Structure formats: structure tokens, C-alpha cells
Amino acid sequence: MFWLKLIRDFIKILREGQTPAQVAGGFALGSILGLSPMLTLQGIVVWFVILILDVNLSAAFVALTVFSLFAFLLDPAFHWVGYQILTNIDALKAFWTTLYNAPVAPLTRFNNTVVMGSFISALILFLPVYIGMKKFVVAYRAHVGAKIEKWKVYQWVKRSTLVQWYEKLRDLGG
């Protein structure tokens, strides 16, 4: 039921609620968590940023889920990117050595090629994901949402007994 509520809340937010920038910010930060491992220092920092900034938490969870599904498929590409950054850029080798000897830096697992590649790729994709999601939210609110509500499939699902049963249960919970 948690995921059903999350998706329902996300669709509700697409229609109204927070600004497109807040929804896009949550989605873009969630994409960083979805693409890169969460059990690292940088994953914890991204969680703190999500909780501190006024971004949409439902959008972050949806993005985390969606991007996590694709991250496993992209691991070979992440490995290649990480390998290139860690081994083929001579100017950074002294930096990596210093960072490896620092007391907290190994918690980032930066020396793992997949972790490095996925985090760098997520940072590179942050701005396109943010801009794309912001445009999507604006377009959805202006054009798409009203058209979807007119679809017979949408009306059929909305009138289904499962959805009505779920709404009664939800209303009982307060």
C-alpha cells in the first residue's frame, strides 16, 4: 500500500501542490540516489540535502525507484566511466592517493569504479533530469492532466471497486 499511496501522491502533486521546481528538484535528487549506491557518504549527504531543501519527497522516492531499476543495466557503462576517471587521468592520481589516505574519504567508496562512475554520471545527468522534469510538470498541469482524466480507462479505474475500497481505507486512517 505504501507504493500505491506514493504513486497516488505523486500524480496528485503533478496536478497541483508544490511548484514545478520543487517537484523537479525532488525528482532530480532522487535520480542521484537511484543511480549511485546509497550506502556511501555521498548518498547520506544527498539524503540530507533532500530533507533540508524544500523539495518534493514523493518525487524523490519515485525517481529513486525508477532510476534504481535502470542502474543495474548501466553498471558496465558506470564501470567504464569510473575506470577512466580513476586510472587514465594522470593529473588526478595524486589527488586520489591523498583522498584514499584521508580518514573519512574511504566512506565514499570513491575507489570503486562503479561507485565513481555512477556518481559522476548522476551528477552529469542532474541538470537535464531537473529541467526535463520541470518542463514535464508544467506541460502536465497545462495540457496532459485534463486529457487523461477524460480517458475511459482512467474513469473506469477511478470507479473500480478496488480504488473505492482503498479510498475508504485511506479515509478511515485519518
Image (spheres, rainbow, N blue to C red):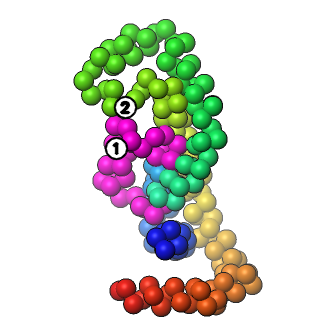
Give percent across and percent down for residue 14.
54, 69
Amino acid carrying mark 1 in the image: Ile
Which quarter of the figure has residue 151? Answer: bottom right
* Residue 120 visible here: no
Q: Position of residue 162 (x, y in %)?
A: 59, 86
Residue lying at the far right of the rendered structure? 152
Verify whether residue 30 appears in magenta.
Answer: no
Report the span colored magenta: 31-59
The answer to whether residue 165 shows anywhere in this view is yes
| Disc 2 secondary structure class | helix
Cα–Cα span, label 2 and label 1: 10 Å
Circle 1 Cα neighbour tier, 10 Å, few/some/many (<14 / 14–19 / ≥20): some
Give the residue number, with chain letter if any, for mark 2.
108
Q: Which residue is mark 1?
A: 44
- The overriding secondary structure of the stretch rendered in magenta is helix
Q: Check whether the beta carbons of the residues at disc 2 and disc 1 lie within 8 A of each other.
A: no
Is residue 124 or residue 134 the one in the foreground? 124
Position of 36 with respect to 143 (left or right) is: left
Q: Earlier in the sequence, mark 2 or mark 1?
A: 1
- SS of the residue under disc 1: helix
User: What's the residue at 36%, 49% (across, down)?
Assistant: 47
Amino acid tagged 2: Thr
Looking at the image, is 162 positioned above or below residue 71? below
Give the image location of residue 90, x and y in percent. 49, 8
